[in-house]
Image (tube, rainbow, N blue to C red):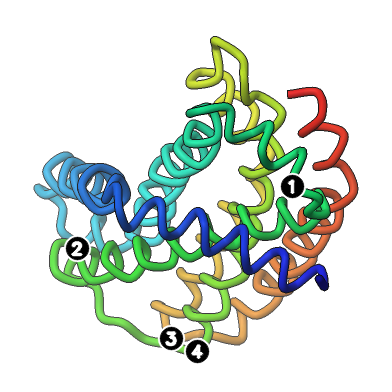
Amino acid sequence: MTLLRESALVMGKDLRIELRSRVALQQILPFGGVVLVLFAFALDPDRGLLSRVAPGLFWAAVLLAALLAVTRSFAVEDANRARDGLRLSGIDPGAVFLGKAAAIAVELLVLEAALGAGVVVLYDVEPRGVLLLACAALAATAGLAATGTVYGVLSSGLRARDTLVPLLVLPAVTPVMLGATRAFEAALDGVPGDGWPWVQLLVVFSALAVAAGVAVFGPLLEES
């Protein structure tokens, strides 16, 4: 089987597990919504400030929810020694990485769509620069998913996994948070020309994260 076909198999497996368990729907999505509501209550006295900082608050909520998604993605592999099954399946480790990262990315994109609607309603934000918003979201999501997958397998099997994943991922995705926030600010301010260089940064970061993940995932999976 080709790398892409094997990746699709892994992605499909993870997404079917999430659809059946509904953890993403019942826990991760509500968590992201609660974060947005808390931000809205905290800054509600100054509506102007709330709309200005909406891009940063949006991506902060996405990042916190992404940590839950990454932890969940590898927690399911602990059940019934499923991780051993992945090792013995004959599937290329690079395909396992791409499949798991793609599944996390799909979950995050659905989450971002829901949270984006929440930002428009709660933060009184007028959506502008839709193309820039979409490209920035896609590139940033790929970077978050790829980085989270690498550090997720690095910490999998450890007792301190739930606390170790945030400590590893948060510093590593700083360029994603910066680039995505700046691109969203440019789009919402009506100056999309200022946002495209940030999208280029996101694309470069995501490409490097994916390439590094394909290269190192196999050894990390064997050691986990």
Look at the picture and state if 13 lies above or below 204.
Answer: above
Identify the residue under disc 1. 89
* Displayed quadrant of residue 171: top right
| Residue occupying image coordinates x 35% and y 51% | 57
Report the Cα–Cα distance between label 2 and label 3: 17 Å
Task: Identify the mark at residue 190; answer none if there is no mark.
Answer: 3
Q: Residue at x 61, y 53 (%)?
A: 100
Q: Are marks 1 and 4 in contact (CB under 8 Å)?
A: no
- Is tag 3's residue or tag 1's residue first in the polypeptide sequence? 1
Up-down: is 175 above or below 68?
Answer: below
Query: Label 2 neighbourhood size at 10 Å, few (<14), some (14-19), many (20+)?
Result: many
Which of labels 2 and 4 is toward the front? Answer: 4
In this rendering, position of residue 172 left or right of residue 45: right
The residue identified by callout 4 is 131
Q: Earlier in the sequence, mark 2 or mark 1?
A: 1
Instruction: Where is residue 66? Give x, y as percent.
Output: 46, 46
Separation of marks 2 and 1 at Cα, in angstroms = 48 Å
Question: Secondary structure beneath disc 1?
Answer: loop
Foreground disc of the pair 1, 4:
1
Reading the chain from its start, which is encountered first: label 2 or label 4? 2
- Report the quarter where the N terminus lies: bottom right
- Give the distance between the C-alpha atoms of the residues marked 3 and 1, in whole angstroms: 50 Å
Distance between the alpha carbons at the discs numbered 2 and 4:
21 Å
Measure the alpha-carbon separation of dots 1 and 4: 40 Å
Dot label at residue 123: 2
At label 4, which amino acid type do we have? Answer: Leu
The image quadrant of residue 43 is top left
For the residue marked with disc 2, what is the amino acid?
Tyr
- Check contact, mark 2 vs mark 4: CB within 8 A: no
Q: Is residue 212 left or right of residue 79?
A: right
Residue 35 shows which numbered tag?
none
